Amino acid sequence: MIDDEKFLRGNVPMTKQEIRILTLAKARLEKISVVVDVGAGTGSITIEAALTACNGKIFAVERNAEAVELIRRNVEKFSVDNVEIISAQAPDGLENLPELDAAIIGGTGGNLEKILDVLGAKLKNGGRIVINAITIQTVAKSLEYFRARNWSVDACEVQITRLKKIGAYDMNQALNPVWIISAEK
């Protein structure tokens, strides 16, 4: 896994390394997986997915122009050639995707249900959707959506605390808690 500091990020939010590790584990990617990263931000998950699914294809969907440029630059920096960037506000940009093995959602712009409808239709049976959520509303909507469709669903809240050097001392520095919701079609 790549250290956070190695990614170009500007003012765009980035999924931290520990969350990326758990998210990709929940997605269960293989070398040939076809994956979409919705709300890709800086592309940190896109890059890690591209390295894991090295013989597959990763689609990074992002609406923010600065973030799209950062994804492009990070793709170049890490020399991954199996990434296609789609500059769009999901669910726009998802309709032409091929059949998917996995979908990872980091941001929805308020369109969660519409995005899940499109991704659910594109996902192979046995495929997985993994959502990183920071609000209780997203957690509740996600669980409700998957349970109403009888998908196998799991959720966990993760709180990461890192050590920060303060003079001669080490202090705990908490990162924002994140819910990781994974569902299998």
Image (tube, rainbow, N blue to C red):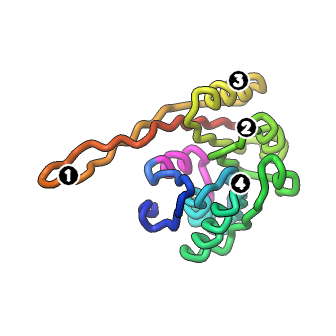
Element carrying mark 2: loop
**Residue 144 circle label:** 3
Q: Earlier in the sequence, mark 4 or mark 3?
A: 4
How crowded is the residue under tag 3: few (<14 C-alpha within 10 Å), some, or many (20+)?
Answer: few
Number of the label disc, if any, that sits on residue 166: 1
Q: In what element is the residue under mark 3?
A: helix
Q: Mark 1 and 4 residues: CB-CB less than 8 Å, in contact?
A: no
Q: Nearer the viewer, mark 1 or mark 4?
A: 1
Q: Calculate the distance from the C-alpha at mark 1 to the C-alpha at mark 4.
A: 40 Å
Query: Where residue 58 sits: x, y (%)?
Result: 69, 61
Q: Which residue is labeled 4 in the image?
A: 36
Q: Earlier in the sequence, mark 3 or mark 2?
A: 2
Q: Nearer the viewer, mark 3 or mark 1?
A: 1
Residue 133, percent from left and from top? 58, 37
Which mark's residue is nearer the viewer, 3 or 2? 2
| Amino acid type of the residue tagged 1 in the rendering | Ile
Residue extending furthest toward the left = 168
Q: Give the alpha-carbon distance from disc 3 to disc 2, as whole Å.
A: 16 Å
Query: Which image quadrant: the C terminus?
Result: top right
**Amino acid type of the residue tagged 4 in the rendering:** Val
